[in-house]
Image (cartoon, rainbow, N blue to C red):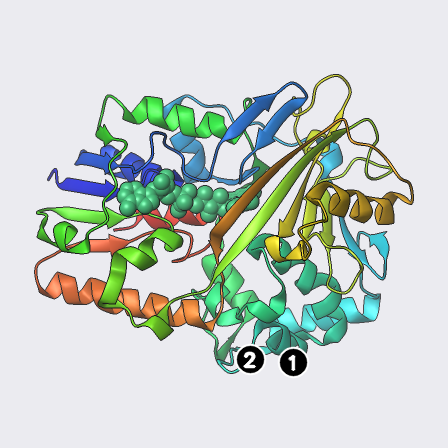
C-alpha cells in the first residue's frame, strides 16, 4: 500500500531514502533547507580538472548497481594501476608495513581471538590489547584514521563496528562473514560524484515533490505531522533540532575536516597508486592522500596530476601558516623534493563528521529510545545519516533501504 513519506534533508541520505520509497510506490515529499540537493557531495569543474567537495568514490554493490541502472548512470571503474595502495610508516612508503610474523599474528587475531569490546577503552587502547602495537600503529591507525577523519584515540571500536557482536563469543572473521556483501570496489562517475547527485535528482523530480529553501527547525511542528517522517539531516543540524530531547552531556562530538585538491606537474609516487595512508607520529599532518588522476580517468587536464589531501582541521595550529604550505611540507617528506603546484582548491567542513566515539554510541541508543517512544505515541519518525550505521555511501544506501 502506498504511504505518505516526508523526508527532511536533501543530502545523499535523503536522496537515497527518496529513491527507495519511490521504488515502493510511496508518495514522497523531500524538504531541503538550501537551494541545492546533494549536501556535502558535489563536484566542481575547474580549468585543471575535477574537484570533489567530499566523497571521491563509492563502494559498488549489486543493489547500488541496479539503482545506477534505474537512474541511467554508468559507473567509472578505477584504473588497474590504482590497485597499488601505500602506508607511510617509519617515514617511508610501504605496501605491507608489517613483518611476516606480525602478519601471522594479525591472521590469528582475526580468525580465532574472541572479539570483546571494552566501553572504558578508546580505539587505540583497545586495538593495542587486541592486535598488539605493530599492527595498531602501522595498519589500523592509518586505515581507520583516514576513513573516520581523526586519530584512533578519539574513536571507539564499538561505535564503529556497532553491527558486530563484541560480547566475547564471536571473532572478527565471523562478524565480517556475517555482514559480508559482494562488492566490486570503489567507483566514481564520468563527471565525478556530482554526476550521481544530478542523475538521482533527474530521476526523482517527476516522481516526488521536492521543496528546496525550506528549513524545518521545529521538532514540535514535525511531531504534529501525519504519515512517516525520515530525518536525514546531518548530525550537526540534528543536535539543535532535538533541543531538550537530549541532555547537554549527551551531545555527541563533531569533527572538522579540510580537503585540499592539488594539481601539479609531478607525480607524488614513482609508480601510480590509489593513495597513501599516514600513521600517527610519522611527521605528516595529513590523514591520507588520494591520487585522483591515477585512480580515475578524466580527473585532470593538460597532463597534470591531481591529488586530494585529507586533514583534520586541527592540523592547522597557527593562523599564520597556510594550508598550502602544510601540504607542500607533507609532500616534500614523501618525494624528498620541493615542488610548486599549478593550482590548489581547499574545502573546509566544520563539524561535518560525527566522532565515532563512546558518546556517539550512547547518543544512538538515545535515538533508538526516542524512535520507540514516538512509535508508541503513534508517530513514525526515524533518524538516518552517517552518524547512525556507518559513514560511507554504501552504508547509507543500505541503511536507507531498510524500513
Ligand atoms: C571530506 C569528506 C570525504 C568523504 N569521502 C567519502 C568517500 O570517499 N566515500 C564515501 O562513501 N563517503 C565519503 N564521505 C562521507 C559521505 O560523503 C557523507 O557521509 C555523506 O555525504 C553524508 O550525507 P548526508 O546526506 O547524510 O548528510 P549531508 O550531506 O550533510 O546532507 C544533509 C542535508 O540536510 C540539509 N538540512 C540540514 N538541516 C536541515 C533542516 N533543518 N531542514 C531541511 N534540510 C536540512 C542540509 O542542507 C543538507 O543538504 C566523505 C565525507 C567528507 C566530509
Apparent side of residue 204 relative to residue 153 in the rendered image (left or right): left
The answer to whether residue 397 of the structure is visible from this angle is no
Quadrant occupied by the N terminus: top left
Tag 2 residue: 121
Whether pointer 1 and pointer 2 mark residues with C-beta atoms closer than 8 Å, the reply is: yes
Apparent side of residue 305 relative to residue 115 in the rendered image (left or right): right
Depth check: give the residue in front, 317 or 379.
317
Tag 1 residue: 129
Q: Position of residue 24 (x, y in %)?
A: 21, 37
Q: Residue at x 11, y 56 (%)?
A: 379
Q: Position of residue 26 (x, y in %)?
A: 17, 36
Indicate whether 11 appears above or below 152.
above
Q: Residue at x 45, y 38 (%)?
A: 62
Q: Position of residue 245 (x, y in %)?
A: 23, 67
- Alpha carbon distance from label 1 to label 2: 10 Å
Depth check: give the residue in front, 306 or 68.
306
Q: Position of residue 220 (x, y in %)?
A: 14, 55
The answer to whether residue 381 of the structure is visible from this angle is yes
Depth check: give the residue in front, 256 or 393.
256
Q: Which mark is residue 120?
A: none
Depth check: give the residue in front, 229 or 331.
331
Q: Residue at x 79, y 61 (%)?
A: 282
Q: Earlier in the sequence, mark 1 or mark 2?
A: 2
Amino acid at each position: 500500500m502506498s504511504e505518505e513519506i516526508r523526508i527532511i534533508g536533501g543530502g545523499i541520505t535523503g536522496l537515497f531514502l527518496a529513491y527507495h520509497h519511490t521504488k515502493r510506490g510511496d508518495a514522497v515529499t523531500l524538504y531541503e533547507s538550501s537551494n541545492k540537493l546533494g549536501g556535502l557531495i558535489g563536484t566542481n569543474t575547474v580549468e585543471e580538472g575535477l574537484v570533489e567537495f567530499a566523497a571521491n568514490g563509492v563502494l559498488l554493490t549489486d543493489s547500488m548497481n541496479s539503482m545506477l541502472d534505474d537512474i541511467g548512470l554508468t559507473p567509472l571503474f578505477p584504473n588497474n594501476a590504482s590497485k597499488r595502495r601505500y602506508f607511510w610508516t617509519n617515514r617511508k612508503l610501504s605496501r605491507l608495513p608489517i613483518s611476516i610474523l606480525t602478519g601471522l599474528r594479525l591472521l590469528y587475531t582475526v580468525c580465532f581471538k574472541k572479539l570483546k569490546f571494552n566501553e572504558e577503552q578508546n580505539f587505540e587502547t583497545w586495538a593495542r590489547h587486541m592486535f598488539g602495537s605493530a599492527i595498531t600503529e602501522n595498519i589500523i591507525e592509518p586505515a581507520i584514521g583516514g576513513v573516520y577523519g581523526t586519530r584512533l584515540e578519539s574513536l571507539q571500536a564499538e561505535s564503529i563496528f556497532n553491527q558486530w557482536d563484541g560480547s566475547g563469543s564471536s571473532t572478527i572473521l565471523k562478524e565480517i562473514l556475517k555482514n559480508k556483501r559482494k562488492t566490486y570496489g570503489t567507483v566514481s562517475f564520468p563527471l565525478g560524484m556530482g554526476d550521481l547527485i544530478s542523475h538521482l535528482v533527474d530521476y526523482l523530480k517527476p516522481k516526488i515533490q521536492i521543496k528546496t529553501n525550506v528549513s524545518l527547525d521545529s521538532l514540535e511542528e514535525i511531531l504534529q505531522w501525519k504519515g512517516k517522517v525520515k530525518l536525514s539531516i546531518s548530525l550537526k543540524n540534528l543536535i539543535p533540532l532535538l533541543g531538550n530531547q537530549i541532555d547537554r552531556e549527551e551531545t555527541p562530538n563533531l569533527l572538522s575536516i579540510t580537503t585540499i585538491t592539488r594539481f601539479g606537474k609531478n607525480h607524488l609516487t614513482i609508480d601510480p597508486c590509489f593513495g597513501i595512508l599516514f600513521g600517527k607520529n610519522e611527521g605528516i599532518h595529513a590523514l591520507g592522500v588520494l591520487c585522483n588522476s591515477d585512480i580515475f580517468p578524466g580527473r585532470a587536464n593538460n597532463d597534470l596530476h591531481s591529488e586530494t589531501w585529507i586533514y583534520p582541521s586541527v592540523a592547522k595550529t597557527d593562523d599564520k601558516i597556510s594550508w598550502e604550505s602544510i601540504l607542500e611540507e607533507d609532500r616534500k617528506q614523501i618525494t624528498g623534493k620541493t615542488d610548486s603546484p599549478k593550482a590548489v582548491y581547499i574545502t573546509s567542513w566544520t563539524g561535518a563528521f560525527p566522532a565515532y566515539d563512546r558518546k556517539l554510541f550512547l547518543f544512538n541508543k538515545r535515538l533508538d529510545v526516542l524512535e520507540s517512544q514516538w512509535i508508541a505515541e503513534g508517530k513514525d519518525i526515524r533518524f538516518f545519516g552517517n552518524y547512525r550505521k556507518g559513514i560511507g555511501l554504501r552504508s547509507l544506501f543500505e541503511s536507507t533501504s531498510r524500513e
